[in-house]
Image (cartoon, coloured by chain):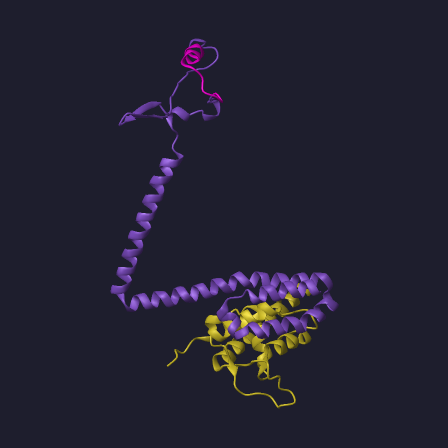
Chain colours: A yellow, B purple
Amino acid sequence: MTKKRDPLLFLPLKPQWFHILLSLAAGEQHGYGIMQEVLNRTNGKVRLWPATLYGSIKRLIEAELIQESAERPAPEFDDARRRYYRLTRLGTQVLDAECERLQELVRVIQVKRALVTE
Amino acid sequence: MNLAWRIYRRLAQAFPHEFNLVYGDEMMRAGEDAIEQIAKTRGSAGLIRLIADIAIRLPLEYLSEMRHDMRYASRALIQSPGFALVGIVSMGLGIALTTHVYSSNWALITRELPAAANAERLVMPEHPVSYYYIEQYRNQNTLFAGVAAFENGVPFNVSLQGQINAKP
């Protein structure tokens, strides 16, 4: 039986962890797919380099935030040579908590900027 | 780009065995897939960044594996304290004994011998000289601070049943 862990203990998330979790929010994805998704989502500003990506995936699995997925996409999209990953329940909770934290941060920034520009 | 790929591949192969079993093939493939795009969009700087990334991660992964091994060993030792005690005492004795032997040998080898305090100032004649010259050298105290002589191989004769053999 696994212990219930508090998602807030993981915050603030490392940027690469956040990007990986965010990429998996839409569903299962393989490592190279995560790399490409992050690159496209950030208009090429953020690149997860291969060693950092797989090192982070390994640590995310150890932290039980993601897991290897047995489900494969439709055969025409499936790359049989690759492992697919998906969020765990804890991973989803951690991602939610991090998004809320960042939204709060953005709200504070907006208020501060409004004060400065007044 | 070929050089970058060769370096990347070598570094990827050098990752810990446990890591490579699970992620080795994929990391290699991801690098192979990404390297062309990186070369096109970021040029040499991108390739250097790719190599730097994997070179930095390599020792980190070894440290991570070592941490896992240490954690596993600690758990195993805690579960069997008797075995842990015997292991710790054996290792302690082994290390103490080795350290003692090496430190005493080291002291013997490196200590300064009284006659060789200024070894670079010691001289020895190339060929044997007679005792007369030794006395001359000793008397001319402007030449040497001190003179010593030794004799090796004192010749003597052995007679066995009337047959004489000279021995050095």
- Left or right? Give the position of B66 relative to B52: left
Name the residue located 34 percent from the left edge and 46 percent from the top edge: B99
Decide which of A21, B121 is in the foreground and name it: B121
x and y percentages locating residue B140 in the rendered image: 45, 9
Callout count: 0
x and y percentages locating residue B43 in the rendered image: 73, 64
Decide which of A17, B57 is in the foreground and name it: B57
Decide which of A109, B129 is in the foreground and name it: B129
Name the residue located 42 percent from the left edge and 9 percent from the top edge: B139
- Left or right? Give the position of B77 relative to A28: left
Q: Residue furthest left?
A: B82
Q: Is residue A19 visible?
A: no
Q: Is residue B43 above or below residue A41?
A: above
Q: Is residue B76 visible?
A: yes
Please tell me whether residue B137 belongs to the stretch shown in magenta.
yes
x and y percentages locating residue A110 in the rendered image: 63, 70
Residue B87's image quarter? bottom left
Residue B13's image quarter? bottom right
Q: Residue furthest front?
A: B162
- Left or right? Give the position of B41 relative to A8: right
* Magenta part of the chain: B125-138
Quarter the N terminus of chain B occupies: bottom right
Name the residue located 62 percent from the left edge and 86 percent from the top edge: A78
Quarter the C terminus of chain B occupies: top left
x and y percentages locating residue A42 in the rendered image: 67, 73
Decide which of B68, A111 is in the foreground and name it: B68
Q: Is residue B157 above or below residue A12?
A: above
